[in-house]
Image (spheres, coloured by chain):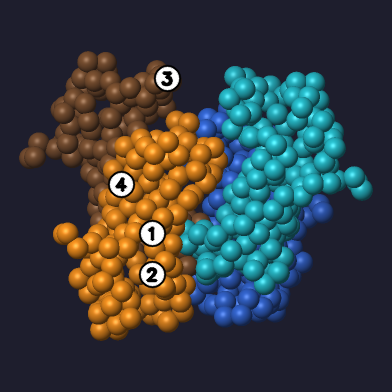
Chain colours: A cyan, B blue, C brown, D orange
C-alpha cells in the first residue's frame, strides 16, 4: 500500500475570523494530496484531462480534530482507501508541525468522459491506471 | 421540524476547469445555508461570536449527485438533522433551477469558548438556543 | 450613464484572521457586480461564453478604504468607466450598511475567442453589445 | 535591492471554467510572495501579528499578461517597490515554466494596531523592520 506525502504552507487567505484555517480550505488541501499521490504513482491528472477524461468528486467526508493555523506547514498523507475498478476512494490525514492530527477524511471519485460526463470503467478504459490502483490500494479492507 | 431555504447565485469564481462548480464551493454554500437557518429561527451567528462563543465544524460529509453550473441559481435547504445539547448536526440539500438535487450532506458543530477553544454545553450555557434547537430538530431520528 | 447595484451578504469564509474581509474577496465581489451590470443592460455573460467568446480580465486595481465585516451586507455599484470598442473598463464602489465606502476600483477586460484566446473587436463582432456599451459608458471622461 | 523568489504549484481549485487560473487567485499568490519576501529578509509576518500589529492591504493593482494553467508551477518574484517609513509597496512578477510573464503588479500596505486598526509609523515603532526595508527597497525610483 502506497502512501504519498506532501507539505503545504498554510496561506493567510485560508484562515477565517476564528483565527484558524477555514474548514473549507482542507478540501482544497485534499485535492493537493491527491494530485501528489497520482504523481507519485507515475501519472499526471492534467494528462488524464488532456485525454478527455475527468475525475469528479462524488463524495467527501472530513473529520476535524485540531485546527491548523497560519504560520505553520502541514503535511498531508494520501492513500487509496478503496478501489473497485470503477470508483476510487482516497484516504487523507493532515498533520501539523507538532505531529498533531488536524483532519482525517476520504473522498470518492469516478472517471467520466469530458464531453458528456458519462462514467467510464477505469478497469477497461484506463488499464495502466487500473493496474497501479489495484496494486497500491489498502489491502486490509 | 423547521427547514430554511436560501437562494444562491452561482459565482464564476466558484467554477473550475471542468466547467462546473468546484466541489469545495458547496462547503461554503452549506455555511450560507446554516447562517440563514440560524437567522430564520431568530438568532444571529455574529452575535454568538460577540458573546465570545465560536461554533467550529467537527465533521462534514457531502454527496455530489449532479453538477451546478455558472449562470444558474441554486437553492439550499437546511435543517437540524441531530441535536443533543452539545453537538448540532445540520442537514443540507442543494437543488438547481430544474429541481435536480446537486448535493446532499451534513455538518457537525460544537460550541467552544473563543479564548481557549474549550467546548461548552449549549444546553447549559445557551439555554435560549437550546430550547429552539430541541424543538426544531428532526424528530424522526 | 448606467449604474448597476447589487447587494452582497458577507460570507464567513470571506473573512481572514484579521477579523475582516480578506482583500482578495473584493475581487470576487467585483465579478458579481459586473455580472449584475451586464444583466441590467439586457445581456448575460453565460450566453457570451455559449457563443464561444470569453471576456478575461487584463487589469485590476482596487483601493481599500474601510474593512467590510461578517454579519453585514454590502452594496456594490458598477458602471462602465471607459469603453473604446475593444476594451471595457468597469468601475466599482463597494459600500457597507452604514454608507461607508469600503473599496473603489476598476477592472479592464477584452473579449477573446474561446478556442484560441485571440482578441476580437467588440464593435465589429458584438454590435448589439457595442451599441449599449457605447451608450451607457461614463461620458465625462 | 533584495528580490525574493517563490515557486507555486497551480491548484485545480484556482482554475475557472475559462480553463485558466481565475484572476482572483493571483491576489493570493502575491500574498505568498510577500510572506516569502518577509521571511527572506529575516522576519516573520505571523510574529508581527503576535506583537499586536497587522499589515492590511490598502491598494492592489495587477496586470494580466498571459494565463497560468493547472499542471504547471509558476514563480513569483517579490521586491520592495517603494517604502517611506509608513507605507510599503511591494512589487510582483509571476512567471510560468516557459518563462512567460503571466502577471505583474503591486500592493500597498500600512501597519496598524490590531485592537483599533489605527496606523502606526513603521519607522518609529518597528525600527528593525524599518532598517531593512529602507536598505532593501528599490533604489532607482
- Residue displayed at 52% across by 33% down: B17
Residue A65 visible in the displayed image: no
Q: Chain of mark 4?
A: D
Q: Residues within 10 Å of mark 4 (few under 14, many from 20)?
A: many
User: Which of labels 2 and 3 is toward the front?
Assistant: 2
Quarter residue D33 falls in: bottom left
Specify which label sits upstream in the sequence, 4 or 2.
2
> Is label 3 in contact with label 1 (beta carbons under 8 Å)?
no
**Which residue, given by chain and number where applicable, does mark 1 sit on?**
D4
How far is mark 1 from mark 4, CA to CA? Answer: 15 Å
Quarter of the rendering occupied by the N terminus of chain C: top left
How far is mark 3 from mark 1, CA to CA? Answer: 36 Å
Instruction: Please state if D131 lies on the left or on the right of A86 as rendered.
Output: left
Q: Residue D88, how many percent across, how many down?
A: 27, 66
Q: Residue D72, how many percent across, how many down?
A: 51, 39
Q: Chain of mark 1?
A: D
Front-most of residues D99 and C46: D99
Quarter residue B98 falls in: top right
Using the image, tell me which numbered label, if any, was put on residue C115: 3
**Which residue, given by chain and number where applicable, does mark 2 sit on?**
D41
Amino acid at each position: 500500500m502506497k502512501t504519498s506525502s506532501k507539505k503545504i504552507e498554510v496561506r493567510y487567505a485560508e484562515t477565517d475570523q476564528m483565527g484558524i484555517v477555514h474548514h473549507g480550505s482542507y478540501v482544497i488541501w485534499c485535492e493537493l494530496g491527491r494530485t501528489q499521490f497520482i504523481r507519485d504513482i507515475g501519472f499526471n491528472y492534467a494528462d488524464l484531462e488532456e485525454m478527455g477524461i475527468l475525475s469528479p468528486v462524488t463524495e467527501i467526508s472530513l473529520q476535524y480534530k485540531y485546527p491548523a493555523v497560519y504560520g505553520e506547514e502541514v503535511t498531508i498523507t494520501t492513500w487509496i482507501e478503496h478501489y473497485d475498478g470503477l470508483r476510487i476512494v482516497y484516504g487523507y490525514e493532515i498533520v501539523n508541525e507538532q505531529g498533531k492530527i488536524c483532519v482525517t477524511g476520504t473522498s470518492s471519485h469516478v472517471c467520466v468522459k469530458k464531453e458528456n460526463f458519462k462514467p467510464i470503467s477505469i478497469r477497461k478504459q484506463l488499464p495502466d491506471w487500473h493496474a497501479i490502483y489495484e496494486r497500491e490500494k489498502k489491502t486490509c479492507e
